[in-house]
Amino acid sequence: MASQLRKGVLEYCVLALLRDGPRYGVELLAELARVDVMATSQGTIYPLLSRLRRTGLADTHLRESENGPPRRYYTLTDAGRSALEEFTANWPSFRTAVDHFLTPGETT
Amino acid sequence: MNDTFAHPLVHSYLSSVGDRAAVLPDVRRQELLADLREHIEVALAESDTVDEGDVRRVLDQLGTPGEIVAAALAEEANSGPVPESGRRTAITLCLIVVALPAALIPVIGSFFAPAAMIAALVRLWRSRQWARREKWQATLLMFSPVIVVPGLAAVFSVAGGGLTAVAVMATLVVAASLPVTAAVRLHRSAARVRQRIRRTA
């Protein structure tokens, strides 16, 4: 159940995590895992990241690190930013609509 | 860093993912393995110690190979048609068009026509560039001469006073145009897929 719900919104949570700047994979997944409801087996996010890259919502580049191998950073593209903005604009009314049906006495 | 992949746990984890991911297109499989390899390498580089416990923790957090490949498959199923090379498509479409007229070639026609038909169907249904609905439409159009030819022949016989040479010709032209229609529709849809992929690439 929770995983069905997560599936639809996960990619926007990922895009939102990239809003303020690039993050590399391990960092991004650790950030997602901090929120219980979004926590999932980290490896399952890579196919999603691959699609974001393929459909042009995110871009990647390698950056050297002082500690170990270079990190692959994910950045938001313009298309990714506008997809995120669209979702952000639609989400409140979606949330309100679901609440409307779920709250006892709200439906007529 | 070579130590990381020499670790037996990492090695068996990645080869398990690799085996299960054989159902994915090769590019996706390679990409998934590269992403996981990088993840393990970075996660272990950031770990204070690298002992067996750390390796286990990193792999546990990644999830089971089954879960990961299932996620990759689900992602693949959502991603719509996957274009194939223009050459591959051209051969499939040629086979669809020539299968029926090939039956008219003396002697070899009776072998060649069914062979072309089967090859065309196999290539059509194995391709990931067309939707299921498009494949069904094309298949029906390819087989429709089986109904259309006797049907038209009957109509001409009743209405036109017998099967004249003109009636036979007209029947064959109509029948041959049905698979051609199928090929044209498939061609247009394949061109759309290619164009869309180019735009998003």
Image (cartoon, helix red, strand yellow):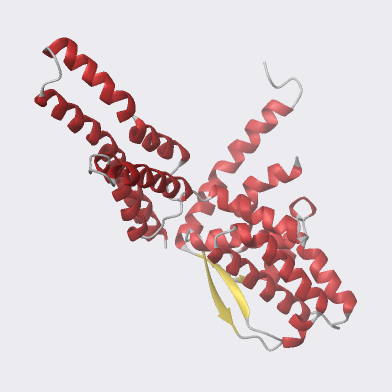
Quarter of the N terminus of chain B within the rendering: bottom right
Residue at screen point 85% across, 70% down:
B57
Q: Quadrant of the C terminus of chain B?
A: bottom left
Q: Is residue B182 left or right of residue A71?
A: left
Residue B45 in view (yes/no): no
Circle count: 0
Which quadrant of the view contains residue A1?
A: top right
Which corner quadrant of the image does residue A101 belong to?
top right
Q: Is residue A98 left or right of residue B96?
A: right
Closer to us: A25 or B71: B71
Q: Residue at x 37, y 37 (%)?
A: B138
Q: Position of residue A80 (x, y in %)?
A: 50, 58
The outermost residue toward the bottom is A66
Position of residue A70 relative to residue B39, above or below, is: below
Q: Position of residue B136 (x, y in %)?
A: 43, 35
Q: x, y (%) of residue B126? A: 48, 49
Is residue B193 visible in this depiction of the protein? yes
User: Residue drawn 33% across and 60% down?
Assistant: B87
Residue B87 left/right relative to B101:
right
Q: Residue B98: where, in percent of width, then height?
A: 27, 45
Q: Report the side of B65 relative to B73 (left or right).
A: right
Camera-side residue: B173 or B10? B173
Q: Residue at x 33, y 54 (%)?
A: B91
In the image, residue B8 sits, relative to residue B114, either above or below, namely below
The residue nearer to you, when weighing B94 against B182, is: B94
| Name of the residue lying farthest toward the front | B107
